[in-house]
Structure formats: C-alpha cells, structure tokens
Image: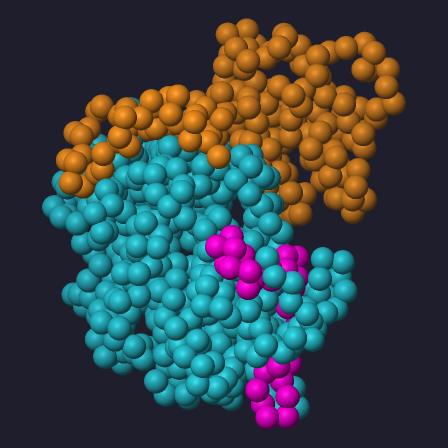
Chain colours: A cyan, B orange
C-alpha cells in the first residue's frame, strides 16, 4: 500500500470506502491514479466478524447520533436510529444482504412516466437506461451476480418455499431466488454460500461480495492506494478559483490532518455526504459546497419498506439460509389503477433473535406480543422494497443543537410520508398477506418500517443544474473537481436495492475522472 | 448458562448488594442445558428486593409461561451493571420500583399489568422494555426455548443442516431455484473456511 504525503497535491481523495468509494478507489488506482481513501470506521475481517447479533451491530454500525422528525413511522418507532448503515472499511457492503436488481428503463424516466404528482420533486435521470446497462453488465460480472451471465441461482431455502407457494397461488410469474452478489458456486477466490443466514453480521465465509475483501485489497495491491482508517472527514477546502484542494479530517488519535488533493470524491452514504457538503461552507460558498441550487440534502429517498410475517402450523426455520434469497417481481410495474405511481418488489427476509422482536414487530408488550415470538420457528417473512417519491422537504440538514464528538452539528433527517408512499405500502402489505393466507397462514403480522438502510438522492444527478447537485457523471454542477460517488447521486429511488446501481455508476464515473484528468480539465 | 452461576456459599459471602436465586424446573427446556438445578445472580447496585421487583417486571412485559425464571434473571444483572455506571439510571430505576409499590412482585399478573400501564410512558418502563427484549431474547436459554439455532458458521452453515428441509409445501422447480453447490460434503464446507 502506498504512503502518500499530506502535502502531495496529486492524489484523488475519496471519502468513504463502501460500494461507491471502494469501487471507485479500485478503478482509479488500477489505472495508475494515486488515491487517499478516508474511512471513518475500523477495519474488520472475516475472522473478526462477531456472530453475536448485538456485538455485530456494534462492530459495524454507524452509531454516531442523528436526530429526526416527520410523519414517517421510523420517527415514532426508532427515534434514536433513523437509518441503519455501516461505519467500517467496506462500508455498508459489509452488512448488506446483497440483493442486486437493476433499475428498469421506465424507472429512470419517473417524472415523464408518473406525470406531475403534487408534493413531489420528481425528475428524470440525466442518463438513459442503455447507457446505464453497459455498466450494470460490468458490475454484475464483477460481483458474480446470480442468474446473470450463466451464474446459477441460489438453491431455495425453507423460507423461500413458503414465499414461492404463496406467490404461485396468487398467479405471480416472476418469482425466483433473486439476483444476488452471493456466490452460488466458488468464484473470484471466494467460497460458495453455505447458507449461514448471518449475512447482516458480516459473511464469515466471504461468499457475499463486499468491498472490504474484493475492491479494497485489489486497490491496495496496485501500490497506488493509501487507505486511512478511523479518519473522519470534517471539511472540504477550496482555493480562490473555487476548485477544491484539500480535505481536513480527524485521525484515529483525534488529531486534525489536512490532505491536499487534485480532486475529491464524497461517498459517505446519503446522510453523511450532504452533511459534509453543508458544513464545508465558506465565504465563497455560504450555503455549503456544490449547493448553489439549494438542493444538497433535499429529495431524500429511503424506499418504502416494511415486514410482513406469516405464521403457520408447521415449522419454517426461516433463519436457516441466505437472508434475502427470494423475490417476487410482478408488482414492479407502473399501474395507476392500483392507486399509486411506481412499483415494488417483495423480497425474502427474516431476522435473528433478538432483532426480530426489537425491529421486526410493532411496539408492544404482554401476552399478545409474546404470542408472536412464541411461534418464531413457524414464521415466514417478506419485506417490501418499493419506490418512494422524492419531496423537496424530505431532507438532511444540520441539527441546530446536537453536536458530534468533534463538536460538529449532527445530521437531522426529516421525512414526511407522501400519500403515494402510504398507498403503495398498503397495497404491498395486502398482497403479501394474501400470499401467506392462500397457503394456510394462521396469523399475519405487519411489522413496522425499520430504520432506513437504502439512503438515496440527497445530492442527485440532474440535467438542469437547478434541479440537483451533480451532472450525469456525479461531478458537481458547481465545482469541477468535486464528485459525489455514492447513493446520494441517484436521481430517483426506483424500487431496486441500490448497491448494484451505486457500483455501476462508480465504474462509469471512474472512466470519466480518468478522461478528465488526462485532458487536464481537472 | 455462562451468565448464571450455581448457588454457592462462597459467592454469597462476596461484597455484593443483592442477589437473585431460584431453581430450574425439571423437564423445562432450560433443564436440558442448565448445568445444575439451582441458579443465582449477584447484583452490585440493586438490592435483592429491587432485583426481585424488576424480575417480576421483566416477566410481565415479556411473558412466556414455560420459560424459566433463570432466563428472565439474566436481564437483571445487565440492568444492574448499566446502573452501576450511570447514577441517573439507578435513580430512574429506584423511582420506578418505588412507584410500583412494595407488593408488585406478589400481585397477580392482571394487577401487575394494570400497574405497569400507568407508567408506560415513563423512562423506567421504556428502559425495562428495551433491555428486557434485548437481553431475554439474546440468551442461550431463550434460543433453546424458541428452537432458534443462531449462528451456524462454526457448524458449516445450514447448507447440509436443514436450510431446505421443509416438506409440507411443494418443492421449487430448478429454474426458479438453483443447484446445490456441486459435490458438497460437510468436510468440503469446513475446508472452505477462510
């Protein structure tokens, strides 16, 4: 691994080492570009991953304070944990469940297809599906996604057998074990999946793709990467020209450091990315960096999510096997007759003990609550993953009161449900309940909306600089050598779990950055 | 059972503030994994009587009739440890316990529910609910009771240990499922460990 001098002005500094930052670091370093990769968290490993759920949560999760408000259920049910993503080398690719669907061509044209919907800030993507597809194909090969390029699907688990039988009773056609970045056979020096069911705790056999043990060590092997762990970016600086030229961060000892940079790429997850841009304000950019449009932090999307649990007379043992290995895609359509715009996937899910009663059930106590837990072994589970519509005021701002360990304002997350969100959720819950009832469920329990794991759109790509923060390559409209490289850049949420799209866009952005550097535009 | 210790004279002579003790019910799920018939936990900040009240609160919040007191007892030393590091919490607990009244643990379940409902919005109640769920459902005792098998990496995953053994519904056609990894045996899975 390289050791890059703090005063060296030539490296690209990438903030965050997850799906976007980790992939970008690999793509740039393998093309000979020096990269300083700042990661706020620590480095874990297959050996170090804890298999005690509460310990694993503490080991991987971003636990620094956030505050929140709004009408979404999360503000009521999980006031101290609005979002659930990682703070560790590899970012959220360490705890993700590895679902890799593509966005559909029509989802990239949300504004055109859905029309004007009051109370939303929809736009079309500035890139076509054809353009994105090229990079989806590369990403799917890189990640070894199942059911693509001849890679077999994962075998059906007990939990999926229940989902499948119910879906077929309702006449659904597009039901399978999913497009997953989980090895169904040994691939890329990593094992096949042994169906542990502990995807979220960090895959100890490495069958699940994570930047931690793929992109990042490969970037290091080029000799061009300087990975600095426990290094929290606190400010991006710029010169008189308005170009960014350094990143100030706190190292593991809490000391302030300043790394000079030729270009800066922010990939801190769609909560921390806008937060960093906002508190990097200066006399030249009083609203924060790249924020002349006022769009930084706005249009926050998180997907319409929620659990549906079915309880049967016979055991399911839903915890045995890859967590999300199953999907129903028939409702992934835009059909206004259903009463809402956009579509949703129904994805397989289960939760361990104690996470199931902590996160998977509506608040409760006493015998009604425990009668659900009593039947844990006879339970099957599904999860809604639906499109939520962007709203200008669903946004990340700097909390005026609460400060982090460095004395900087924490992120405040405000989310109001749109009537479209509520209609989609209700439809999905009804269909999933019908699936379980069709095969004899004794009881259906609708779970709450859990803390958001899909954080998107807070520095979105837009054709018109007034509508968003970056152009079609994640390059900010305002500052040529400042890029956004994570889920913040998605123009709209669609109904696809976002990681594959983040990786595809990072692959595409890397080519653009290399080209622009060669032509001395940045 | 690591968090519980056998009832032991030497242990009781240590300078602890309180302790909880009980017997494992023979034939219960716990009896199969317990090391002995008796259990006890030491408390640092809470008295025995306070511990007994909190034990009754935990049982009332998350009642599972066939689950031994020993499983609920694990919640109490965890809260006691929290309170040892946090004076404000200790005060919250003491006030909460006082509000429940001296006979709370002796009351019928319906009375205990009525009493708890009055304090549902209090920090005391919410702390007790959260910590009870977190600790009760994390223990090996609860895992055994609910039949939850937990982590499987140490045993080679569930690939050959029942991840697809459900037989009361039709099998999924191969085109919507996928093949088992070729020629997999238990030994190969272990060899595959990194």
> Relative to residue A420, is residue B38 drawn left or right?
right
Q: Is residue A314 magenta?
A: no
Asked if residue A226 is positioned above or below residue A78 in the image, the reply reads below
Q: Position of residue B149 (x, y in %)?
A: 45, 25
Residue at point 62%, 19% (across, down)? B1
Q: Nearer the viewer, residue A117 or A108?
A: A108
Which residue is at 21% across, 75% downward?
Answer: A113
Q: Give the number of callouts.
A: 0
Percent from the top left, x then y, of residue B77? Answer: 71, 29
Task: Mark yes or no: residue B128 visible.
Answer: yes
Judging depth in this view, the residue of B170 and A501 nearest the camera is A501
Q: Nearer the viewer, residue B106 or A125?
A: A125
Residue A219 belongs to magenta span? yes
Visible in this render: residue A68? no
- Image quarter of residue B33: top right
Residue drawn 43% across the image and 25% down it = B190
Q: Residue at x 59, y 93 (%)?
A: A241
Quadrant of the image containing the N terminus of chain A: bottom right
When the figure is inspected, residue A450 is found, relative to residue A249, above or below; the finding is: above
Query: Where is residue B73 drawn, in percent x and y?
Result: 65, 24
Horizontal and vertical percent position of residue B24: 60, 11
In the image, A439 versus A142, the foreground residue is A142
Which range of residues does the magenta coloring cover? Answer: A217-245
Q: Quick check: B3 left or right of B19?
A: left
Q: Is residue B57 left or right of residue A292?
A: right
């Amino acid at each position: 691994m390289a050791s890059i001098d703090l005063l060296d002005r030539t490296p690209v500094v990438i903030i965050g080492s997850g799906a976007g930052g980790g992939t970008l670091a690999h793509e740039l370093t393998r093309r000979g570009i020096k990269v300083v990769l700042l990661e706020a968290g620590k480095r874990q490993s297959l050996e170090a991953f804890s298999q005690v759920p509460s310990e694993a949560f503490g080991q991987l999760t971003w636990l620094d304070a956030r505050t929140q408000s709004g009408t979404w259920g999360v503000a009521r049910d999980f006031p101290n944990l609005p979002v659930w993503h990682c703070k560790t080398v590899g970012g959220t690719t360490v705890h993700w469940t590895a679902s890799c669907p593509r966005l559909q061509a029509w989802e990239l044209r949300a504004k055109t297809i859905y029309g004007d919907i009051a109370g939303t800030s929809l736009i079309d993507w500035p890139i076509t599906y054809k353009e994105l597809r090229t990079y989806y194909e590369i990403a799917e090969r890189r990640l070894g996604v199942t059911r693509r390029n001849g890679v077999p699907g994962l075998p059906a688990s007990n939990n999926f057998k229940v989902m499948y039988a119910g879906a077929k009773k309702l006449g659904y056609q597009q039901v399978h074990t999913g497009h997953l970045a989980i090895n169904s056979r040994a691939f890329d020096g990593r094992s096949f999946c042994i169906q542990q069911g502990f995807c979220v705790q960090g895959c100890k056999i490495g069958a699940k793709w994570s930047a931690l043990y793929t992109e990042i060590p490969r970037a290091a092997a080029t000799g061009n990467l300087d990975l600095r762990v426990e290094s929290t970016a606190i400010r991006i600086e710029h010169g008189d020209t308005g170009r960014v030229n350094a990143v100030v961060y706190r190292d593991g000892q809490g000391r302030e450091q300043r790394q000079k940079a030729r270009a800066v790429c922010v990939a801190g997850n769609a909560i921390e990315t806008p937060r960093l841009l906002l508190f990097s304000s200066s006399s030249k950019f009083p609203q924060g960096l790249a924020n002349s449009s006022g769009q930084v932090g706005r249009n926050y999307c998180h997907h319409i999510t929620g659990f549906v649990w079915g309880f049967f007379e016979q055991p399911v043992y839903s915890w045995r096997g890859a967590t999300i290995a199953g999907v129903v895609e028939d409702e992934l359509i835009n059909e206004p007759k259903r009463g809402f715009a956009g579509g949703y996937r129904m994805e397989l899910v289960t939760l361990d003990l104690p996470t199931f009663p902590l996160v998977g059930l509506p608040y409760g106590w006493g015998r009604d609550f425990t009668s659900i837990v009593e039947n844990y072994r006879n339970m099957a589970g599904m999860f809604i993953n639906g499109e939520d519509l962007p709203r200008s005021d669903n946004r990340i701002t700097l909390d005026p009161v609460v400060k982090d360990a460095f004395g900087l304002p924490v992120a405040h997350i405000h989310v109001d449900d749109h009537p479209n969100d509520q209609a989609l959720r209700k439809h999905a819950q009804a269909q999933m309940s019908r699936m379980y009832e069709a095969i004899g469920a004794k009881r259906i329990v609708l779970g709450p909306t859990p803390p958001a794991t899909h954080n998107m759109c807070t520095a979105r790509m837009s054709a018109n600089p007034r509508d968003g923060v970056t152009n079609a390559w994640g390059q900010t409209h305002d500052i040529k050598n400042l890029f956004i490289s994570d889920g913040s850049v998605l123009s709209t949420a669609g109904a696809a779990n976002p990681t594959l799209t983040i990786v595809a866009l990072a692959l595409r952005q890397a080519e653009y950055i290399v080209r622009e550097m060669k032509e001395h535009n940045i | 059972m690591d968090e519980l210790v056998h009832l032991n004279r030497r242990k009781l002579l240590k300078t602890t503030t309180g302790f909880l003790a009980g017997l494992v019910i023979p034939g219960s799920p716990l009896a199969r994994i317990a090391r002995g018939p008796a259990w006890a936990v030491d408390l640092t900040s809470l008295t025995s009587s306070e511990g007994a009240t909190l034990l009754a609160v935990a049982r009332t919040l998350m009642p599972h009739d066939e689950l031994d007191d020993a499983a609920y007892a694990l919640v109490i030393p965890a809260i006691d440890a929290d309170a040892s590091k946090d004076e404000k919490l200790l005060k919250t607990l003491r006030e909460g316990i006082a509000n429940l009244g001296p006979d709370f643990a002796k009351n019928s379940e319906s009375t205990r529910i009525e009493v708890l409902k009055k304090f549902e919005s209090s920090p005391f109640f919410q702390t007790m609910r959260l910590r009870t769920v977190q600790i009760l459902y994390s223990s090996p005792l609860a895992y055994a009771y609910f039949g939850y098998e937990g982590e499987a990496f140490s045993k080679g995953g569930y690939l050959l240990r029942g991840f697809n053994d459900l037989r009361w519904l039709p099998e999924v056609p191969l085109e919507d499922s996928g093949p088992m990894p070729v020629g997999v045996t238990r030994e190969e899975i272990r060899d595959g460990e990194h």
